[in-house]
Amino acid sequence: MRIVRFTPGPDTGLGTDPLFGVLDQDIITVITGDPIYQGIQKTAATVALSTVRLLAPVIPRSKVICVGKNYADHAAEMGGVVPDQPVIFLKPNTSVIGPNDTIVWPEMSERVDHEAELAIVIGRICKDVPQERVNDVIFGYTIANDVTARDLQKVDGQWTRAKGFDTFCPIGPWIDTDFVPGTQKITASVNGEIKQSSTLGEMFFKVPEIIAFISQVMTLLPGDVILTGTPSGIGPMVAGGHATMAIEGLGELTNKVSKR
């Protein structure tokens, strides 16, 4: 099942406030409330996908947790190796935007990079989750771009500023509740040219290990989003261009990049 969050078009008769829905082919069935908190309760209202504006499918009320250096080839291109334990960091929830929104290039940065990632959406409050129980706490999966001001990352020696700007966490276009990570292809392209290409099978720490580890460190809340790392091929996006992150079976997430 694919869950979308959207703003209805002016001719849909559904008002102007953001709504959630279940996407089937090109038709959205409106659901009541936030599905992560209220469950999936369908209404009789439907709308064509072509008549709405998709938004980020979840707005984390709490946090976005990211895993760094989780693909060996990416760790190598950054001058290191995959660590013995997951390296985690946070992006503020104010960095989240949706499909077709604009990544705003900060004035203080000269290089803004793409990082294609699989994202996990947490569906319930949890702590110290054993690996064999992680599916119980996952609501679904989506696509993310862990946008990074690479020059600032090098200057700071840590990642908060470089990865924390507003608009630096595009996610979408929907949450897929049935997706099962395996060996699906993951790519990133800039202005139509592929820059990253790998498979989810190349992740060193898999989803069960990631959730079990993070939940030992911090309580996970409904709507929290976990980014699982990026493969090699990271590089700059083009100011005034666009970037597309794609995962086989999940779809594509495209965002414009503002001019400097």
Image (cartoon, helix red, strand yellow):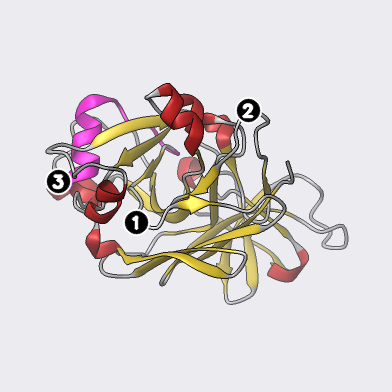
Q: Disc 1 designates what residue?
A: 232
Question: Callout 2: 10 Å neighbours few (<14), some, many (20+)?
Answer: few
Residue lying at 67% horizontally and 56% vertically, measured from the top left: 100
Quarter assignment of residue 215: top left
Q: Secondary structure at mark 1?
A: loop
Q: Nearer the viewer, mark 1 or mark 3?
A: 1
Q: Secondary structure at mark 2?
A: loop
Residue 259 vs residue 100, the one in the foreground: 259
Looking at numbered disc 2 in the image, what kind of residue is underneath it?
Met
Q: Disc 3 designates what residue?
A: 131
Left or right: residue 157 compared with residue 254: left
Quadrant in which the C terminus appears: top right
Quarter assignment of residue 63: top left
Residue 34, position as x, y percentages in the image: 55, 44
Work out whether mark 1 precedes mark 3 in sequence or the reverse, and give the earlier one: 3
Q: Disc 2 designates what residue?
A: 108
